[in-house]
Amino acid sequence: MPDNGHADRLGMEIAMENQVDYGKIERNAKRRETVRKTITYILLAFWAVVVLFPFYWMILSSVKSYSAYNSEYIPKMYTLSPTLQNYADAFTAVPLARYFTNTLIFTVLTTAIMLVVITLAAFAFARLEFKGKNILFVLFLSLMMIPNELVIITNYVTITNLNMRNTFQGLILPSITSVFYIYLLKENFEQIPDSLYYAAKVDGTSDLKYLLRVMIPISKPTLITITILKVIECWNSYVWPRLITDDENYYLVSNGIQEIRENGFGRENIPAMMAAVVVISVPLIVLFLIFRKKVMEGVSRGGTKG
Amino acid sequence: MMKKLKNSSWKAFLYLLPAILFLGFFMVYPLIDVFVYSFEEGYNSASQTFYGVGMYNYSYVLHDPYFLQAVKNTFILVIITVPLSTGLALLISVGLSSIRALKNLFQTVYFLPYVTNTLAVGLVFMILFKKTAYSDGLINLFLHWFGAGPVDFIDGPYWAKMFVLCFYTVWIVMPFKILILTSALSSVNPQYYQAAKVDGTSKMRTFFRITLPMISPMIFYLVITGFIGAFKAYSDAVALFGTNLNAAGMNTIVGYVYDMLYGDSGGYPSYASAAAILLFAIVLTITCINLLISKKKVQY
Amino acid sequence: MRNVWKKLVCSILLPVLALGSLLSLTGCHGAKGMKAFVIPEHFDMDRDYEITFWAKNDTNKTQTAIYEQAINDFETLYPNITVNMRLYTDYGKIYNDVITNISTNTTPNICITYPDHIATYLTGVNLVVPLDALMTDAQYGLGGSEVRFDAPTVNEIIPKFLEECYIGDHYYAMPYMRSSEACYINKTYVEALGYTIPEELTWDFIWEVSEAAMAQDADGNYLVNGQKVMIPFIYKSTDNMMIQMLKQKGAGYSTQDGEIQVFNDTTEELLYTIAEHAKTGAFSTFKISSYPANFLNAGQCIFAIDSTAGATWMGSNAPLLDIAEDKIVDFEVEVKAIPQFDPAHPQMISQGPSVCIFNKNDPQEVLASWLFVQYLLTNEVQTAYAETEGYVPVTSKAQDSAEYQDYLARCGEDDNTHYDVKIKATKLLLAHIDDTFVTPVFSGSASLRDAAGQLIENTVKSIRRGQTVDHAYIEQLYSDMNSLYRLDQLSSGNGVPGAGKEDLGKLPGTAVILLSSLAVAWVLIILYVVWQIIRKKKAQTGG
């Protein structure tokens, strides 16, 4: 006859051991978790420093005075006598405010016209039926693969022949086209259920009214995405403005900065050049910080759609 | 009640007209024109004459050591930055997804490079890395702490210049990738994770067997766009090394096209066109390969 | 009915349009030459003219003011002519812009240029106006009867400067200003090192003193100036450096026919010497280190070689300064001619802006441009502009004028208009006008000049990177420069660019790899796609 008491005691011992095991496992897991979290935070913090450091250096250099900057054989990570002289220099030596305004005008006009053009085109592809629709769309898609650099050569000759160098028209017109955004918007339009359209048709609404009253409001998030992407693209535009503007009054910020760096005070006066760089970078950063959520949502949506 | 509006053809045409006009004038026409240019041999802007029609332009460009150097530079840039940035972005996104505190702060910080002008920030990188008569530059200071000698990253040996270019390119493209990947990660159905946890799967296995395949379409999208974007690198190099990229040996294919068109030796749109078409061929090939691979690999 | 109509339109119209545009495009790429310029009988004063003038100034506000004053005065004399000026700080940019504007027929009317550049412009048909007939015209020529201001006659232009603008068989430009290069020396430091500056500088002297200046103390401060930075010898324009060194040695650079001789053994020897001194850090260039003036004024350079025009920036009391005030070091400046290999027969380059006129369809417009060019040669403009920097007026009329002679005499009176370094540099050039030379001008000579300079730049850069400069390196360098500046397009020997497309030889390795990988990739892609299609078909039929 088995000794049940012994088995019970054994059982209890095993149970107690198991309990200890659980405790230990939990503690181990917690420790691993903490270690993992710490490592994650360290990694994230490291990259955050890498991202932020150039900005810090930019601002730091822009407030160091010219002679102080040049006499630092070992660059200092701080400055004891910050000065705003560089900003004054940057604005007076070159028409920095002008570059700014130009870029603003360029960005706003290009984005506005682009929105009109692609909304119409996306609507046609998404909603209207017509002969050769698929072929045309495939053609459009294939145009997406053409790199900008290929067409720049001829566009330059075209714009010069039309006497539009050093004008806003010359800057804006070739920059409007973008098949990617048509594609993006079309996809979005196609998500709007047919029933809405037919209901509107029954009411006797014209296509245009339907587009304006119904589709655009529904697609607002995508439109915001496209706007944001285009704005950033315009702000960064360098090759095209560089090619067709040689009049200082029509420079955009990117080729303006490059001019300063190559031929202007930026050759020698690094702090002043940094001041110019800060001035150029600040607006978009401020805009971004204000509309942070919208911007990030918009860009991610644009990316995931593609 | 499924009325199909047949006679909307003209209306559609009207809607499409602005897009067709812009695209036709600024994309299709130039494409054909560039093709024509590339076959007009040795067309020179000053004299406005060319030898004849043939493949001389392509031959010239392929013999030009500066074009080949640009091809080498571009390829190295692509091969290094695309996997590196995608991998790093993946790592960071995974890290971001697993924490709660400070997540928003980190995300905001990481996104900053995307909203700045790449040329402007490139200048900051240039002064950080450049060694002048007055100072060795900040990065060299860091290196000094580790006992390494001062390296001139901007005017120095090829590997140093390539390093700066790759580093800067990665720095620039990270925000977009991190953002895409974090949103992709957050869109994975948590049920899969719960099922895995119940099964007692280790974290590593979960990652490789569940997470990765679920976000693989996004990863492939990033790789494809990363490749295409890296092939078109130009303004980053200009920001770091100035416009005379040929002399610095750091030209990219796009830079070569541009220099041929407008550079110090006068305009040769013919050579520029030939080089541009070669670039297009390369990008097309790689995109096709990428598409085929992604069609195969992306299955879940 | 409608459908059929549409079908017709689509299937016929579109291809026709496409074909038409294609054909019209090929027609677009061709020379659209203009008719040769013929002087009109009479300058039509009833019409209004608007002419564009692309000018160069050296970031010197005074020069801009002089241009604007000249334009104002000219417009007062000729109220029906408006001159629109666009300023550049770099000759190369004017060159680039003109070339890109040739194909679109939007060249300026007048631009500041070098004869080298004009040679390239001349490859276009009737692009640049030959000035012979204009110069000697009785009414509108130099000092002609109908000219409303006191312009110099042909004889009153210094012949040597005028000859430099003779290209081929015509005068295609008028000289505007002339300068040369000079060596600005920190006399205080030279004497501190125990040397005395000789009458005529030699290259050996400069190398010797520069090497002596490299002595440092235990902390890494240079003994001669107590600072951490010292580059004893900085040369601004390395292209001039190479050209002048070769000329002084009597070695080949180029010929009038466009034959390129610069890649020779003397060049190699010179590059070795330069490499040797770059290695110790005794020599550097503007492109690598920055403006010689800035280093000189901060006491960090002893021999700064720059244009005589650059004299306005040289010295502790210079009127124009680019560095921070507290960095300026006090020292005595001496101005000498550039170093020579043979001090008994000095040779130095002659440089400086010239002005050319572009042909337009309207000969009256060209005539109006010519009148403005003439105005630039009047005494007022010549003396005013020459006094801004170390330039020399190109007319004997201006040079001998009382005002200019007075200016020269008041050397050192103040640190502005009569800044002594500037006037000394000018006097240097005036004394050596007969020792100056120019390089042969042909289409592509501008590129050749850049190549010559780049030889030195690359050598110094490679030394700084720790590479060895030996014969193999020089061979590679020669070949690289040939490609970079497309000199192979010129060496066909008759100066016309690419008179023959030459046989380029075998494809280099990388190109072969590129092309073959592209080909292989496409073969694989097509095979793969075909395989997929076959597999799908099999699955359909098999299933």
Image: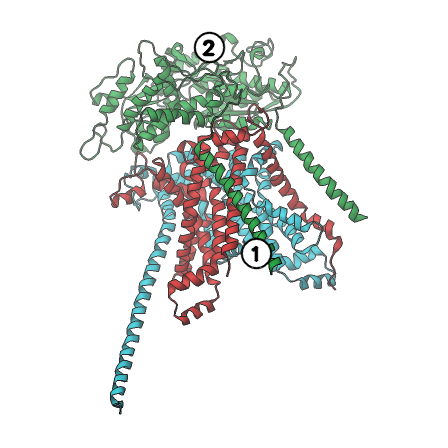
What's the residue at 60%, 26% (across, down)?
C105
**Left-right relation of C147 to C278:** right
Callout 1: helix, strand or loop?
helix
In the image, residue A39 lies at what x, y percent? 32, 59
Q: Quadrant of residue C189?
A: top left
C11 above or below B261? below
Callout 2: helix, strand or loop?
loop
Q: Which chain is green?
A: C
**Left-right relation of C195 to A215:** left
Of residue A3 and residue C467, the one placed in the foreground of this image is A3
**Left-right relation of A154 to B87:** right
Disc 2 versus disc 1: nearer the observer = 1
Q: Which chain is cyan?
A: A
Label 2 packing within 10 angstroms: few (<14), some (14-19), many (20+)? some
Report the chain holding disc 1: A
Q: Which residue is mark 2?
A: C158
| In the image, farthest residue toward the right | C1
Q: Which residue is mark 1?
A: A222
Of residue A233 and residue C539, the one placed in the foreground of this image is C539
Of residue A292 and residue A42, the one placed in the foreground of this image is A42
Decide if residue C228 is in sight here. Answer: yes
Question: Of the residues shown, which amino acid type is indicated by label 1?
Answer: Thr
In the image, residue A122 lies at what x, y percent? 63, 52
In the image, residue A175 lies at what x, y percent? 57, 42
Q: Colour of chain B?
A: red
Mark carried by residue C405: none
Question: Of the residues shown, which amino acid type is indicated by label 2?
Answer: Ile
